[in-house]
Amino acid sequence: MIPWKILGGKTFVFANYEGFRFGGVGTFERAYPTAAMRAGVVQVQNATTSAITGTENGATVSYAPGAFVPYNLNPSPVIVTIGNPNSTLSPLRTVTLAPCLRTAALQCDPRGLGVNSTIQQLWNTIPLPNDPLSGGDQFNTQGYLSTIRLPLTSDVYVGRIDHDFNSKHRFFTSFRAQRLVNTVNTQIDVGGVLPGTTRGQYGSTATRVQTPELLVFGLASTLSSTLTNDLRLSYLWNWWGWGTSGIPPQLAGLGGALEIASPTDTDAETSGTGALIPYNVNTQSVRQRTWDGQDKMIRDDLSWVKGNHLVQFGGFFQRNVDYFSRTDNGTTISNQIVYQIASKSIAFSGTGFNYFPTSLPNNSTMRTSYSNLATEVLGLVGFTQVLYTREGAELSIQPLGKQSQVRSTIKTYNAWSYLFIRMGLRFARPTFLRNARLLLWQDKHTLPF
Protein backbone atom coordinates (compact mmCIF):
# COMPACT_ATOMS: atom_id res chain seq x y z
CA MET A 1 0.00 0.00 0.00
CA ILE A 2 1.51 3.32 -1.11
CA PRO A 3 -0.67 6.34 -0.22
CA TRP A 4 0.03 9.75 -1.70
CA LYS A 5 -1.90 12.88 -2.59
CA ILE A 6 -2.88 13.50 -6.17
CA LEU A 7 -5.79 15.25 -7.87
CA GLY A 8 -6.73 16.82 -4.57
CA GLY A 9 -7.17 13.59 -2.61
CA LYS A 10 -5.45 10.46 -1.40
CA THR A 11 -4.35 7.61 -3.63
CA PHE A 12 -3.67 4.04 -2.54
CA VAL A 13 -1.89 1.50 -4.72
CA PHE A 14 -1.98 -2.26 -4.16
CA ALA A 15 -0.03 -4.84 -6.16
CA ASN A 16 0.59 -8.56 -5.87
CA TYR A 17 2.32 -11.24 -7.92
CA GLU A 18 2.23 -15.00 -7.50
CA GLY A 19 4.15 -17.43 -9.65
CA PHE A 20 5.06 -21.08 -9.50
CA ARG A 21 6.94 -23.58 -11.62
CA PHE A 22 6.38 -27.33 -11.33
CA GLY A 23 8.83 -29.53 -13.21
CA GLY A 24 6.42 -32.45 -13.49
CA VAL A 25 9.06 -35.13 -14.22
CA GLY A 26 7.95 -38.76 -14.06
CA THR A 27 8.24 -42.14 -15.74
CA PHE A 28 6.29 -42.92 -18.89
CA GLU A 29 5.76 -46.06 -20.96
CA ARG A 30 4.14 -47.03 -24.22
CA ALA A 31 4.21 -50.21 -26.29
CA TYR A 32 6.05 -50.35 -29.61
CA PRO A 33 6.96 -53.08 -32.15
CA THR A 34 9.63 -55.61 -31.24
CA ALA A 35 12.61 -56.31 -33.46
CA ALA A 36 10.83 -59.39 -34.84
CA MET A 37 7.74 -57.45 -35.89
CA ARG A 38 9.90 -54.77 -37.49
CA ALA A 39 11.61 -57.52 -39.47
CA GLY A 40 8.26 -58.74 -40.84
CA VAL A 41 7.58 -61.61 -38.41
CA VAL A 42 4.28 -61.67 -36.51
CA GLN A 43 3.43 -63.94 -33.60
CA VAL A 44 -0.15 -65.19 -33.11
CA GLN A 45 -1.20 -66.88 -29.88
CA ASN A 46 -2.64 -70.37 -30.25
CA ALA A 47 -6.22 -69.89 -29.08
CA THR A 48 -7.26 -73.49 -29.79
CA THR A 49 -7.11 -76.54 -27.55
CA SER A 50 -4.77 -78.40 -29.88
CA ALA A 51 -1.11 -78.06 -30.78
CA ILE A 52 -0.13 -76.34 -34.04
CA THR A 53 2.73 -77.62 -36.19
CA GLY A 54 5.33 -75.24 -37.59
CA THR A 55 8.95 -74.98 -38.70
CA GLU A 56 11.93 -73.31 -36.99
CA ASN A 57 15.54 -73.63 -38.16
CA GLY A 58 14.36 -76.08 -40.83
CA ALA A 59 12.94 -78.47 -38.23
CA THR A 60 9.36 -79.25 -37.35
CA VAL A 61 8.16 -77.86 -34.03
CA SER A 62 4.89 -77.97 -32.11
CA TYR A 63 3.17 -74.95 -30.52
CA ALA A 64 1.03 -75.88 -27.54
CA PRO A 65 -2.23 -74.11 -26.73
CA GLY A 66 -1.39 -70.65 -25.42
CA ALA A 67 1.96 -70.52 -27.20
CA PHE A 68 2.74 -67.85 -29.80
CA VAL A 69 3.14 -69.10 -33.37
CA PRO A 70 5.55 -67.09 -35.60
CA TYR A 71 4.75 -66.27 -39.23
CA ASN A 72 7.35 -64.79 -41.57
CA LEU A 73 5.59 -62.49 -44.06
CA ASN A 74 8.74 -61.85 -46.09
CA PRO A 75 9.46 -63.57 -49.41
CA SER A 76 12.78 -64.87 -48.06
CA PRO A 77 13.92 -66.60 -44.84
CA VAL A 78 14.87 -64.31 -41.94
CA ILE A 79 16.83 -64.74 -38.73
CA VAL A 80 15.00 -63.15 -35.81
CA THR A 81 14.61 -63.32 -32.06
CA ILE A 82 11.10 -64.32 -31.04
CA GLY A 83 9.31 -65.24 -27.81
CA ASN A 84 9.56 -63.63 -24.39
CA PRO A 85 11.98 -64.29 -21.51
CA ASN A 86 9.05 -64.54 -19.10
CA SER A 87 7.20 -67.23 -21.06
CA THR A 88 7.59 -70.97 -20.66
CA LEU A 89 5.40 -71.84 -23.65
CA SER A 90 7.19 -69.38 -25.97
CA PRO A 91 10.65 -68.70 -24.51
CA LEU A 92 13.03 -66.14 -25.95
CA ARG A 93 15.04 -67.68 -28.81
CA THR A 94 16.77 -66.75 -32.08
CA VAL A 95 15.56 -68.76 -35.05
CA THR A 96 15.54 -68.92 -38.85
CA LEU A 97 12.03 -68.78 -40.25
CA ALA A 98 11.02 -69.66 -43.79
CA PRO A 99 8.31 -67.59 -45.54
CA CYS A 100 4.81 -68.58 -44.49
CA LEU A 101 2.61 -70.16 -47.14
CA ARG A 102 -1.11 -69.79 -47.91
CA THR A 103 -1.05 -72.75 -50.30
CA ALA A 104 1.52 -75.40 -50.98
CA ALA A 105 3.36 -72.99 -53.31
CA LEU A 106 2.01 -69.45 -52.72
CA GLN A 107 3.36 -67.18 -50.03
CA CYS A 108 1.18 -65.31 -47.52
CA ASP A 109 1.94 -61.92 -49.06
CA PRO A 110 0.38 -62.07 -52.54
CA ARG A 111 2.52 -59.09 -53.60
CA GLY A 112 5.74 -60.90 -52.74
CA LEU A 113 7.14 -57.79 -51.00
CA GLY A 114 7.05 -58.66 -47.32
CA VAL A 115 7.40 -55.99 -44.66
CA ASN A 116 6.52 -52.56 -46.04
CA SER A 117 9.65 -50.42 -46.43
CA THR A 118 7.80 -47.21 -45.46
CA ILE A 119 6.44 -48.84 -42.31
CA GLN A 120 9.91 -50.15 -41.52
CA GLN A 121 11.42 -46.68 -42.03
CA LEU A 122 8.80 -45.20 -39.72
CA TRP A 123 9.38 -47.84 -37.03
CA ASN A 124 13.12 -47.25 -37.18
CA THR A 125 12.54 -43.78 -35.75
CA ILE A 126 11.18 -45.45 -32.60
CA PRO A 127 13.63 -46.94 -30.08
CA LEU A 128 13.42 -50.67 -29.48
CA PRO A 129 11.39 -51.77 -26.44
CA ASN A 130 13.35 -52.06 -23.19
CA ASP A 131 10.65 -53.59 -21.00
CA PRO A 132 9.73 -57.07 -22.29
CA LEU A 133 7.67 -57.89 -19.21
CA SER A 134 5.00 -55.21 -19.62
CA GLY A 135 3.28 -53.23 -22.33
CA GLY A 136 1.58 -54.57 -25.46
CA ASP A 137 1.15 -58.31 -25.93
CA GLN A 138 4.85 -58.78 -24.94
CA PHE A 139 5.61 -60.65 -28.18
CA ASN A 140 4.79 -58.36 -31.08
CA THR A 141 4.85 -55.22 -28.99
CA GLN A 142 6.58 -54.46 -25.71
CA GLY A 143 6.95 -51.46 -23.47
CA TYR A 144 9.50 -48.70 -23.86
CA LEU A 145 10.10 -47.18 -20.44
CA SER A 146 11.65 -43.74 -20.03
CA THR A 147 10.99 -40.40 -18.37
CA ILE A 148 8.86 -37.46 -19.42
CA ARG A 149 8.63 -33.85 -18.35
CA LEU A 150 5.18 -32.27 -18.05
CA PRO A 151 5.75 -28.82 -16.51
CA LEU A 152 3.06 -26.58 -15.07
CA THR A 153 3.68 -22.82 -15.06
CA SER A 154 1.51 -20.11 -13.57
CA ASP A 155 1.85 -16.32 -13.26
CA VAL A 156 -0.85 -14.33 -11.47
CA TYR A 157 -0.92 -10.52 -11.38
CA VAL A 158 -3.24 -8.43 -9.21
CA GLY A 159 -3.30 -4.63 -9.00
CA ARG A 160 -5.67 -2.06 -7.55
CA ILE A 161 -5.71 1.73 -7.28
CA ASP A 162 -8.06 3.62 -4.95
CA HIS A 163 -8.39 7.38 -5.04
CA ASP A 164 -10.55 9.49 -2.74
CA PHE A 165 -11.22 12.79 -4.47
CA ASN A 166 -13.03 13.93 -1.35
CA SER A 167 -15.54 12.58 1.16
CA LYS A 168 -18.19 12.32 -1.55
CA HIS A 169 -16.41 10.76 -4.51
CA ARG A 170 -14.27 7.62 -4.38
CA PHE A 171 -12.70 6.08 -7.48
CA PHE A 172 -11.01 2.70 -7.93
CA THR A 173 -9.60 0.54 -10.70
CA SER A 174 -8.64 -3.10 -10.44
CA PHE A 175 -6.76 -5.43 -12.76
CA ARG A 176 -6.33 -9.20 -12.50
CA ALA A 177 -4.54 -11.46 -14.96
CA GLN A 178 -3.12 -14.94 -15.12
CA ARG A 179 -1.07 -16.96 -17.54
CA LEU A 180 -1.37 -20.68 -16.93
CA VAL A 181 0.55 -23.13 -19.14
CA ASN A 182 -0.10 -26.80 -18.47
CA THR A 183 1.88 -29.32 -20.51
CA VAL A 184 -0.12 -32.54 -20.87
CA ASN A 185 0.57 -35.99 -22.29
CA THR A 186 -2.06 -35.99 -25.03
CA GLN A 187 0.56 -35.90 -27.80
CA ILE A 188 3.90 -37.56 -27.10
CA ASP A 189 6.81 -37.99 -29.51
CA VAL A 190 9.49 -40.59 -28.80
CA GLY A 191 11.03 -40.70 -32.27
CA GLY A 192 12.50 -37.20 -32.35
CA VAL A 193 10.40 -36.42 -35.43
CA LEU A 194 8.58 -33.31 -34.22
CA PRO A 195 10.51 -30.08 -33.62
CA GLY A 196 12.07 -29.84 -30.17
CA THR A 197 11.97 -33.58 -29.46
CA THR A 198 14.75 -36.17 -29.19
CA ARG A 199 14.72 -39.79 -30.31
CA GLY A 200 14.47 -42.12 -27.34
CA GLN A 201 13.17 -39.43 -24.99
CA TYR A 202 9.46 -38.94 -24.48
CA GLY A 203 8.57 -35.35 -25.24
CA SER A 204 5.17 -33.67 -25.03
CA THR A 205 4.05 -31.21 -27.69
CA ALA A 206 0.65 -30.54 -26.11
CA THR A 207 -0.06 -27.50 -23.96
CA ARG A 208 -3.19 -26.10 -22.38
CA VAL A 209 -2.90 -22.33 -22.10
CA GLN A 210 -5.27 -20.01 -20.22
CA THR A 211 -4.85 -16.22 -20.07
CA PRO A 212 -7.87 -14.66 -18.33
CA GLU A 213 -7.85 -10.91 -17.63
CA LEU A 214 -10.30 -8.62 -15.82
CA LEU A 215 -10.15 -4.82 -15.75
CA VAL A 216 -12.68 -2.85 -13.67
CA PHE A 217 -13.26 0.89 -13.12
CA GLY A 218 -15.62 2.16 -10.44
CA LEU A 219 -16.80 5.48 -9.05
CA ALA A 220 -18.88 5.61 -5.86
CA SER A 221 -20.50 8.99 -5.17
CA THR A 222 -22.48 10.29 -2.21
CA LEU A 223 -24.67 12.90 -3.88
CA SER A 224 -26.58 13.77 -0.71
CA SER A 225 -27.35 12.31 2.68
CA THR A 226 -30.02 10.12 1.07
CA LEU A 227 -28.76 9.66 -2.47
CA THR A 228 -25.77 7.56 -3.64
CA ASN A 229 -24.57 6.44 -7.07
CA ASP A 230 -22.31 3.55 -8.10
CA LEU A 231 -20.84 3.46 -11.62
CA ARG A 232 -18.90 0.43 -12.91
CA LEU A 233 -17.12 -0.32 -16.18
CA SER A 234 -15.46 -3.66 -16.83
CA TYR A 235 -13.60 -5.57 -19.52
CA LEU A 236 -13.27 -9.35 -19.27
CA TRP A 237 -11.01 -11.31 -21.61
CA ASN A 238 -11.29 -15.08 -21.46
CA TRP A 239 -8.80 -16.81 -23.76
CA TRP A 240 -7.76 -20.44 -23.75
CA GLY A 241 -6.13 -22.70 -26.28
CA TRP A 242 -5.37 -26.38 -26.78
CA GLY A 243 -2.04 -26.56 -28.54
CA THR A 244 -0.38 -29.55 -30.20
CA SER A 245 1.86 -30.15 -33.19
CA GLY A 246 -1.16 -31.26 -35.17
CA ILE A 247 -1.03 -34.18 -37.60
CA PRO A 248 1.92 -33.66 -39.95
CA PRO A 249 3.19 -36.58 -42.07
CA GLN A 250 5.93 -38.46 -40.23
CA LEU A 251 8.12 -38.95 -43.30
CA ALA A 252 8.99 -36.72 -46.23
CA GLY A 253 6.96 -37.51 -49.34
CA LEU A 254 3.91 -38.87 -47.54
CA GLY A 255 0.58 -37.35 -48.51
CA GLY A 256 -0.65 -37.57 -44.93
CA ALA A 257 0.15 -38.99 -41.54
CA LEU A 258 0.19 -42.76 -40.99
CA GLU A 259 -1.78 -44.13 -38.05
CA ILE A 260 -0.89 -47.78 -37.43
CA ALA A 261 -3.32 -49.68 -35.24
CA SER A 262 -2.16 -51.69 -32.26
CA PRO A 263 -2.30 -55.51 -32.66
CA THR A 264 -5.58 -55.75 -30.75
CA ASP A 265 -7.47 -53.10 -32.76
CA THR A 266 -9.06 -53.21 -36.20
CA ASP A 267 -9.39 -49.40 -36.24
CA ALA A 268 -6.33 -47.19 -35.78
CA GLU A 269 -8.33 -44.32 -34.28
CA THR A 270 -9.49 -46.73 -31.58
CA SER A 271 -5.85 -47.37 -30.70
CA GLY A 272 -5.55 -43.69 -29.80
CA THR A 273 -2.27 -42.96 -28.06
CA GLY A 274 -1.36 -46.66 -28.38
CA ALA A 275 -0.90 -46.50 -32.16
CA LEU A 276 2.43 -47.93 -33.38
CA ILE A 277 3.93 -44.63 -34.54
CA PRO A 278 6.51 -42.23 -33.07
CA TYR A 279 3.89 -39.66 -32.09
CA ASN A 280 0.16 -40.20 -31.81
CA VAL A 281 -2.15 -38.47 -34.28
CA ASN A 282 -5.56 -39.55 -32.97
CA THR A 283 -8.04 -36.71 -33.22
CA GLN A 284 -9.33 -36.89 -29.66
CA SER A 285 -5.84 -36.23 -28.30
CA VAL A 286 -4.18 -33.89 -30.80
CA ARG A 287 -7.07 -31.63 -31.82
CA GLN A 288 -6.42 -27.91 -31.58
CA ARG A 289 -9.03 -25.53 -30.19
CA THR A 290 -9.10 -21.83 -29.36
CA TRP A 291 -11.63 -19.74 -27.42
CA ASP A 292 -11.39 -15.96 -27.43
CA GLY A 293 -14.15 -14.25 -25.43
CA GLN A 294 -14.23 -10.50 -24.82
CA ASP A 295 -16.98 -9.04 -22.64
CA LYS A 296 -17.47 -5.31 -22.09
CA MET A 297 -19.96 -3.93 -19.58
CA ILE A 298 -21.10 -0.59 -18.13
CA ARG A 299 -23.48 -0.46 -15.19
CA ASP A 300 -24.91 2.30 -13.03
CA ASP A 301 -26.91 2.01 -9.78
CA LEU A 302 -28.65 4.94 -8.06
CA SER A 303 -29.91 4.42 -4.49
CA TRP A 304 -32.33 6.76 -2.70
CA VAL A 305 -33.39 6.43 0.92
CA LYS A 306 -36.76 7.99 1.77
CA GLY A 307 -37.73 7.48 5.40
CA ASN A 308 -37.92 3.73 5.95
CA HIS A 309 -37.95 3.05 2.23
CA LEU A 310 -35.07 2.32 -0.15
CA VAL A 311 -35.58 2.92 -3.85
CA GLN A 312 -32.98 1.81 -6.43
CA PHE A 313 -32.75 2.63 -10.11
CA GLY A 314 -30.19 1.24 -12.49
CA GLY A 315 -29.26 0.02 -15.91
CA PHE A 316 -26.48 -1.71 -17.75
CA PHE A 317 -25.21 -2.46 -21.23
CA GLN A 318 -23.07 -5.51 -22.01
CA ARG A 319 -21.49 -6.66 -25.27
CA ASN A 320 -20.03 -10.16 -25.51
CA VAL A 321 -17.94 -11.17 -28.51
CA ASP A 322 -16.92 -14.84 -28.59
CA TYR A 323 -14.71 -16.55 -31.15
CA PHE A 324 -14.12 -20.31 -31.31
CA SER A 325 -12.08 -22.38 -33.73
CA ARG A 326 -11.31 -26.08 -33.91
CA THR A 327 -9.49 -28.58 -36.13
CA ASP A 328 -11.82 -31.54 -35.55
CA ASN A 329 -15.43 -32.56 -36.03
CA GLY A 330 -15.89 -33.29 -32.34
CA THR A 331 -15.31 -37.02 -32.64
CA THR A 332 -12.62 -38.82 -34.66
CA ILE A 333 -11.89 -36.81 -37.81
CA SER A 334 -9.45 -33.92 -38.15
CA ASN A 335 -8.67 -31.39 -40.86
CA GLN A 336 -5.46 -33.22 -41.84
CA ILE A 337 -5.18 -36.35 -43.99
CA VAL A 338 -4.66 -39.57 -42.04
CA TYR A 339 -4.01 -42.99 -43.58
CA GLN A 340 -5.31 -45.70 -41.28
CA ILE A 341 -3.09 -48.77 -41.38
CA ALA A 342 -5.71 -51.10 -39.92
CA SER A 343 -7.58 -54.24 -40.91
CA LYS A 344 -10.96 -52.51 -40.90
CA SER A 345 -12.45 -52.83 -44.41
CA ILE A 346 -9.75 -55.35 -45.39
CA ALA A 347 -10.65 -59.02 -45.95
CA PHE A 348 -8.06 -61.82 -45.93
CA SER A 349 -10.48 -64.44 -47.14
CA GLY A 350 -13.68 -64.65 -49.13
CA THR A 351 -15.25 -66.21 -52.17
CA GLY A 352 -12.43 -67.41 -54.38
CA PHE A 353 -9.50 -66.12 -52.29
CA ASN A 354 -7.71 -66.90 -49.04
CA TYR A 355 -4.58 -65.18 -47.73
CA PHE A 356 -4.35 -66.87 -44.34
CA PRO A 357 -1.41 -69.21 -43.69
CA THR A 358 -2.11 -72.88 -44.19
CA SER A 359 -1.00 -73.59 -40.61
CA LEU A 360 -3.38 -71.00 -39.13
CA PRO A 361 -6.48 -72.75 -37.74
CA ASN A 362 -9.96 -71.61 -38.69
CA ASN A 363 -10.29 -69.83 -35.37
CA SER A 364 -11.88 -66.37 -35.31
CA THR A 365 -9.65 -65.06 -32.52
CA MET A 366 -6.46 -66.17 -34.24
CA ARG A 367 -7.60 -64.97 -37.66
CA THR A 368 -8.50 -61.53 -36.30
CA SER A 369 -5.11 -61.31 -34.60
CA TYR A 370 -3.30 -62.37 -37.77
CA SER A 371 -5.30 -59.91 -39.90
CA ASN A 372 -4.41 -57.03 -37.59
CA LEU A 373 -0.72 -57.88 -37.42
CA ALA A 374 -0.31 -58.63 -41.14
CA THR A 375 -2.07 -55.38 -42.07
CA GLU A 376 0.35 -53.40 -39.93
CA VAL A 377 3.51 -55.12 -41.15
CA LEU A 378 2.49 -55.05 -44.83
CA GLY A 379 1.34 -51.42 -44.57
CA LEU A 380 -2.17 -51.99 -45.91
CA VAL A 381 -4.38 -48.88 -45.81
CA GLY A 382 -7.82 -49.75 -44.47
CA PHE A 383 -9.23 -46.28 -45.08
CA THR A 384 -8.34 -42.61 -45.09
CA GLN A 385 -10.07 -39.73 -43.40
CA VAL A 386 -10.00 -35.93 -43.47
CA LEU A 387 -12.31 -33.08 -42.50
CA TYR A 388 -13.06 -30.18 -44.86
CA THR A 389 -14.82 -27.02 -43.75
CA ARG A 390 -17.38 -25.00 -45.68
CA GLU A 391 -18.08 -21.28 -45.49
CA GLY A 392 -20.27 -18.59 -46.98
CA ALA A 393 -23.80 -18.50 -48.32
CA GLU A 394 -22.94 -21.15 -50.90
CA LEU A 395 -21.13 -23.31 -48.33
CA SER A 396 -18.00 -23.31 -50.48
CA ILE A 397 -15.48 -25.96 -49.54
CA GLN A 398 -12.34 -24.52 -47.96
CA PRO A 399 -8.69 -25.47 -48.50
CA LEU A 400 -7.25 -28.48 -46.70
CA GLY A 401 -6.33 -27.62 -43.13
CA LYS A 402 -8.75 -24.70 -42.71
CA GLN A 403 -10.17 -24.69 -39.19
CA SER A 404 -13.88 -24.47 -38.49
CA GLN A 405 -14.72 -21.15 -36.88
CA VAL A 406 -17.65 -19.66 -35.01
CA ARG A 407 -18.00 -16.00 -34.06
CA SER A 408 -20.93 -14.62 -32.08
CA THR A 409 -21.82 -11.18 -30.73
CA ILE A 410 -24.38 -10.76 -27.97
CA LYS A 411 -25.62 -7.36 -26.80
CA THR A 412 -27.61 -7.09 -23.58
CA TYR A 413 -29.53 -4.07 -22.33
CA ASN A 414 -31.39 -3.82 -19.07
CA ALA A 415 -32.83 -1.28 -16.71
CA TRP A 416 -34.41 -1.83 -13.33
CA SER A 417 -35.90 -0.25 -10.27
CA TYR A 418 -36.47 -1.70 -6.83
CA LEU A 419 -38.51 -0.53 -3.85
CA PHE A 420 -37.34 -1.79 -0.48
CA ILE A 421 -39.80 -1.27 2.42
CA ARG A 422 -38.66 -1.92 5.97
CA MET A 423 -41.38 -3.41 8.14
CA GLY A 424 -41.48 -4.43 11.78
CA LEU A 425 -42.75 -7.72 13.12
CA ARG A 426 -43.44 -8.48 16.77
CA PHE A 427 -44.21 -11.91 18.11
CA ALA A 428 -44.50 -13.52 21.56
CA ARG A 429 -44.53 -17.02 22.98
CA PRO A 430 -47.01 -18.32 25.58
CA THR A 431 -46.09 -17.98 29.25
CA PHE A 432 -44.97 -21.01 31.21
CA LEU A 433 -44.06 -21.84 34.82
CA ARG A 434 -40.55 -22.68 35.94
CA ASN A 435 -39.67 -23.03 39.66
CA ALA A 436 -42.94 -21.38 40.60
CA ARG A 437 -41.95 -18.17 38.84
CA LEU A 438 -43.87 -16.58 35.99
CA LEU A 439 -41.68 -15.83 32.98
CA LEU A 440 -42.62 -14.18 29.73
CA TRP A 441 -40.26 -14.75 26.76
CA GLN A 442 -40.60 -12.09 24.16
CA ASP A 443 -38.65 -11.21 21.06
CA LYS A 444 -38.75 -8.30 18.72
CA HIS A 445 -37.30 -8.64 15.24
CA THR A 446 -37.24 -6.24 12.32
CA LEU A 447 -37.19 -7.74 8.87
CA PRO A 448 -36.57 -5.96 5.55
CA PHE A 449 -38.86 -6.79 2.60
Image (tube, rainbow, N blue to C red):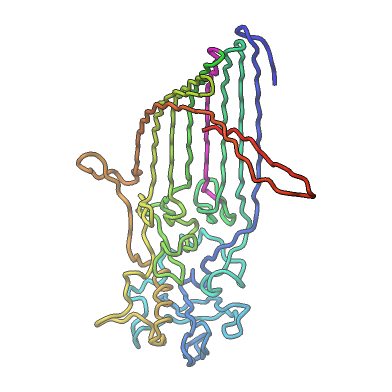
Quadrant assignment, res 295: top left
In front: 230, or 209?
230
- Image coordinates of residue 60 in percent, x first then y, are 50, 91
- Image coordinates of residue 423 in percent, x first then y, are 54, 30
Q: Residue furthest top?
A: 8
Placement of 297 over or under 242, stated as above or below: above
Placement of 5 over or under 250, stated as above or below: above
In front: 196, or 265?
265
- Image coordinates of residue 330 in percent, x first then y, are 38, 53
User: Which residue is painted at 66% across and 18% down in the image?
Assistant: 12
- Image coordinates of residue 368 in percent, x first then y, are 40, 77
Placement of 131 over or under 173, stated as above or below: below
Q: In this view, does 29 lie to the left or right of 366?
A: right
Q: Is residue 39 left or right of residue 144?
A: left
Residue 166 part of the magenta segment:
no
- What segment is highlighted magenta in the picture? 204-224
Q: Which residue lies furthest to the bottom in this view?
A: 50
In front: 305, or 331?
305
Image quarter (top left, top right, bottom left or bottom right) of the N terminus: top right
User: Which residue is painted at 48% across and 76% down in the image?
Assistant: 78
User: Which residue is painted at 43% across and 57% down in the image?
Assistant: 282
Quadrant assignment, res 221: top right
